[in-house]
Amino acid sequence: MGNRFRWDMFFTSFLPLWISIIVSNIWTIVCKGISFVAKTELLPISPRQILDACIQFLCIVKIEAISVIVLAIYTCISIHHINGVIRREQRSNNKSKGTIRRARRANKLTAEFLLAYILPMLAFNFSSLKSIVLFLIYFAVLSFLCVRNSNVYTNVFLELKGYRMYDCDIECIVMNNPHLYTDCLIISTKNLTQTLPLEIEYFDFENYIYIEIGA
């Protein structure tokens, strides 16, 4: 799977953080707007004065406004791309198949990811340009390491879509012979712990990491 998909998987893993930043900045914009209106002489007022006041207010909240717009747009783009890749793989006539021999829920991965990465990032002040620059440096290093090492499977967006992560042993046909892959991570909407052995269709997201795409 290409780097674009891995990057979008990594980016949407921080969906709670992006939503928190958007809500926080919108809250700040509203509070500054109320304060700005309270300090502004409203009457008499002309269209020219309204335009000048709007421009002045935008200059005050430009950091917050840019953050909200950029995050909202790119989050939507990443989600759209992930959905597009999954739909394309679901429509493919050349799906990979395997049989689950052992499966258990990987319950701790999402909680560990949230605690290790997302909560510390909330300490940054996203209405300060200096803080945003420091955050971008930190996030750039983290994204480079995670994407490079394919540590992008813990995805909150997929969790919201009903996918769950399972630690599995899966048997696949390799060179017309069955081969058992142990300790694989399979991301699936199905409960893979029931009715074993279970045959699934999947696509290879990364080495030993698979996304189930069966009906």
Image (cartoon, rainbow, N blue to C red):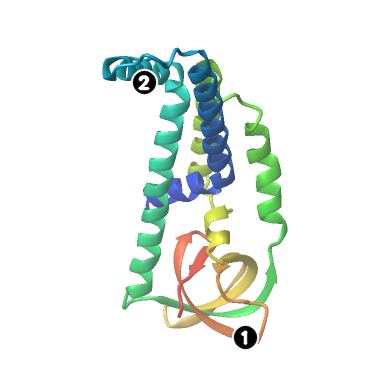
Between tags 2 and 1, which lies in front?
2
Q: Residue at x 66, y 53 (%)?
A: 110
**Callout 1 amino acid:** Pro
Q: Residue at x 55, y 72 (%)?
A: 189
Q: Residue at x 64, y 67 (%)?
A: 166
Seen in the picture, residue 175 relative to 66 is either above or below; the reply is: below
Q: In x, y percent, where is residue 141?
A: 52, 31
Seen in the picture, residue 183 relative to 178 is either above or below; the reply is: above
Q: Name the quadrant of the N terminus.
A: bottom left
Residue 173 in sight from this viewpoint = no
**Callout 2 amino acid:** Cys
Q: In x, y percent, where is residue 179?
A: 54, 77
Q: In x, y percent, where is residue 126?
A: 55, 26
The answer for how far apart the CA atoms under marks 2 and 1 are is 64 Å
Q: In x, y percent, where is residue 194?
A: 67, 82
Count residues near mark 1 (Cα–Cα under 10 Å), then give few for <14, some for 14-19, many for 20+.
some
Residue that lies at the very extreme toward the front in this rendered image: 44
Of callouts 2 and 1, which one flags the residue occurring earlier in the amino acid sequence?
A: 2
Instruction: Identify the residue position indicated by label 2 in the image.
Output: 54
